Amino acid sequence: MSVLAIDAGTTGVTAVVVTPDGRIAAKGYQEFAQHFPKPGWVEHAPEEIWQATLEAVREVLTKVDRSELTAIGITNQRETILLWDRETLGSPRRAIVWQDRRTADICTRLKDAGHEERVTEVTGLRLDPYFSGTKLMWLAEQEPHTWALVSSGRYAIGTVDSYLIARMTRGTYHVTDVSNASRTLLFDLTTGDWSDELCGLFGVPRDALPELVPSWGEIAVSDPRTFLDLSLPIAGIAGDQQSALFGQTCFDVGDSKCTYGTGSFILTNTGTSLERSSAGLLSTAAWRSPSGELTYALEGAIFVTGAAVQWLRDGLQIVGSAAETAAIAATVPDTEGVVFVPALTGLGAPHWDPHARGLIIGLTRGTTRGHIVRATLEAIAFEVRDVLETMPAALSSLRVDGGAAANDLLCQIQADQIGVPVERPKLVETTALGAAFLAGLGTGVWDSTDDLRATWQLDRSFSPGGDRDAADAAHRRWIDAVERSKAWA
């Protein structure tokens, strides 16, 4: 009895098979293209996401006995919004990605009209281009012919999980869970349902939205004609960050994790209590059980961390791979005053400035690529510290995951900056693991969250060391640079 988990991320799709003891028995991966039609715009072709999903799963199926598979779990990049034809499943346009900044003016307009306080009260979010609602408003205003087919019921609206489930089931199911719905600006955190009020504000027909289902349980069934001859229950859904919280077995109130992905996301479990922050954190739905109980979280969303390393590789071309960054950064003892603010798509928590832009400051004739690469790793740690300092409760430790968590130097810099141990599990693929855990919980592979907790294993704990005064001074210099990056665009 094993579970197939699909992690449809921002730059590629990972498929893994997870065994009952929590091991990853096989893994497949397929990257897909990033489209940048204008500065600040980011799009994905839905068909390319689907083909990457098929390729990643096809790869994993060559490594396992498919008869052992009992369920499918799906996790995904969250605020990215897609449209598709309910009959043909083709998409009329590319998806607008969570990183996309094109709706900054719409957000300003809604704020000026006095809507932000009410939107935050209902959704726990803020008016920022990050979230899906303003993307849909933009589509309605800029592409009225496309939007007419949304209004008429021909086109469905959904996040990536909804789209993949539609493709996997030949259009039979149009569903999502609360963790994804709560990122759209259209979901009422208190009632746990779509908000008619906010659908009205953003001009989104409620009938175009997916049905809300529990985060685990038998939600849908894949169609073998469409999905690689697999007929399996789709039994777990969660947005990537909530999935990582689940995969890190952060089931108790106060448990926290940081995922280093394209961006970095810090989540703290607040249980059945809806906690609100006045310091730039988001309130969000973590998951909903089949009994209907809703678990909440506080979240700090940082837009660009791993994407900054990707930019060093693809944009500046000063590293050959992300794996090289630790060795290159270690060629220098410090940054010699170089600070990198990776506001390449604006600033997220706790600053929330969509008009901020990236900044590298402190350059001299003596600056080398080692200084810039080290400043990039430091920036990731500084951004996480900024968020953690706004959390209501003090941390005793921080669990980390995601691709960059494999970087020992980053983990050590992070521990030095936040002053508590950073704990890295043996499996850093916790986003995919969370989707597997949800699906397995929904189909009896695991009986309880206690069974899941027993699978978590520590790889290494990084204790804070070095000079506390020096760490604080470096952080103050970072804050100064952040202020200089704001309101640039």
Image: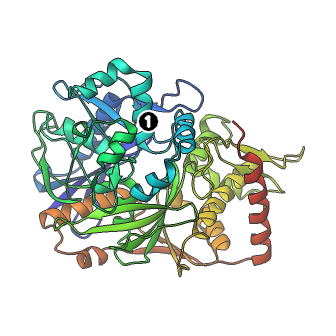
- Indicate whether 379 appears above or below 476: above
Q: Going by the image, does 343 lie left or right of 127?
A: right
Q: Going by the image, does 410 lie left or right of 29?
A: right
Q: Going by the image, does 476 lie left or right of 419?
A: right
* Residue at (52% x, 66% y) in the render: 277
Amino acid carrying label 1: it is: Lys
Picture quarter with the N terminus: bottom left
The picture places residue 270, in percent across and down from the top left corner, at 40, 73
Can residue 412 be seen in this snapshot?
yes
The picture places residue 466, in percent across and down from the top left corner, at 74, 77
Relative depth, front residue between 47 and 330: 47
* Residue at (44% x, 51% y) in the render: 119
Can residue 467 be seen in this snapshot?
no
Colouring chosen for the image of the structure: rainbow
Dividing the picture into quadrants, the one containing residue 312 is top right
Q: Which residue is mark 1?
A: 135
Picture quarter with the C terminus: top right
Relative depth, front residue between 162 and 191: 191
- Indicate whether 354 appears above or below 473: above
Q: How crowded is the residue under tag 1: few (<14 C-alpha within 10 Å), some, or many (20+)? A: many
The picture places residue 488, in percent across and down from the top left corner, at 72, 39
Residue occupying the far right of the picture: 365
* Residue at (55% x, 44% y) in the render: 111
